[in-house]
Image: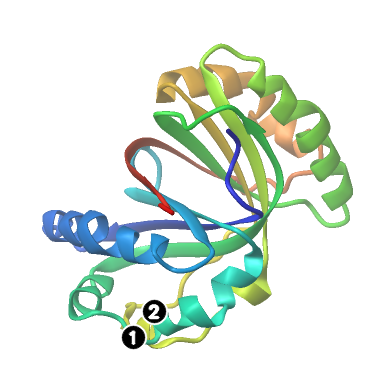
Amino acid sequence: MPLLGQAVLAIWNDVVAGEEAEFDRWHLGEHIPERVGVPGFLRGRRYDVVDGERRYFTLYETERPEVLNGPDYLARLDNPTPWTQKCIRLFRNNKRTACRVTLSLGHGVGGAITTLDVGPAPGRDIELRDWLTRAALPALIGADGIIGAHLCEADEGVTRVQAAEKTLLDRPDELARWVVMIEGTEAAVIDRACATILAAPALTSHGAAADVATGSYRLVYSLGRSG
């Protein structure tokens, strides 16, 4: 199936060197289950890097964008558990963005994902959006081993929530612009499929700014909402 709901929260981060095991215990054992328990959260996924600037990628799928600055979620952000207070301080190089789902194609969850933080060049947002949604992403879905292809556009107003948990970070979050995600059976399969269609020359010729940040990740954990 494609992404669940109308919005996602995309998070890329590193952690303090030597604290990876503690981060894993908390992230998989407490944090993702807690977040998925918030009303309106539908699924959480954790990925580890294959090739990219940041070691971890976490994706939450929600019913609507407003869930991500709504009272139930803000209540969690304003009341972090003791373990969360400890582990949020381990985050480094954090990039976090709430996005509206523009297009989601596919038929399942892939074992690997490639993320592209891409934005339109000035005045070319309609051109880039049309090319991605009408040509590039539909073409990728037809490639062998590709499970999903998604375009999500940042909602800065929803992203920039003020909460107690934010004060625990070593510095404010960076923001992504548009998030393109390609899911597949493995990272090498996605690389081959994207080599031409989403290569830098193709992106920029269809309206993307030149500074595209790409990461390749393998799926570690996925948890959907029960009930």
Tell me the CA gap for discs 1 and 2.
5 Å
What x and y, as percent, mark residue 119?
Answer: 70, 52
Nearer-the-camera pick, 82 or 41: 41
| In the rendered image, the vertical position of residue 161 relative to residue 54, given as above or below | below
Kindly check if marks 1 and 2 are in contact, taking CB atoms under 8 A apart as contact: yes
Q: Is residue 54 visible?
A: no
Name the image quarter holding residue 67. Answer: bottom right
What x and y, as percent, mark residue 151?
Answer: 67, 44
Residue 57, numbered label: none
What x and y, as percent, mark residue 135?
Answer: 80, 27
> Circle 2 sits in a helix, a strand or a loop, which is it?
helix
Q: What type is the residue that disc 2 sits on?
A: Arg
**109 left or right, relative to 87:** right
Quadrant of the image containing the C terminus: bottom left
Nearer-the-camera pick, 200 or 118: 118
Q: Residues within 10 Å of mark 1 (few under 14, many from 20)?
A: few
Furthest residue in direction front, as rendered: 227
> Circle 1 sits in a helix, a strand or a loop, which is it?
loop
Quadrant of the image containing the N terminus: top right
| In the rendered image, the vertical position of residue 35 relative to residue 215, given as above or below | below
**63 left or right, relative to 138:** left
Q: What type is the residue that disc 1 sits on?
A: Asn
Name the image quarter holding residue 143. Answer: top right
| Residue located at (49% from left, 68% from top) | 39
| Residue located at (64% from left, 65% from top) | 65
Figure coloring: rainbow
Q: Is residue 87 visible?
A: yes
Give the residue pinned by disc 1.
79
Give the residue pinned by disc 2.
76
Nearer-the-camera pick, 12 or 102: 102
Name the image quarter holding residue 91. Answer: bottom left
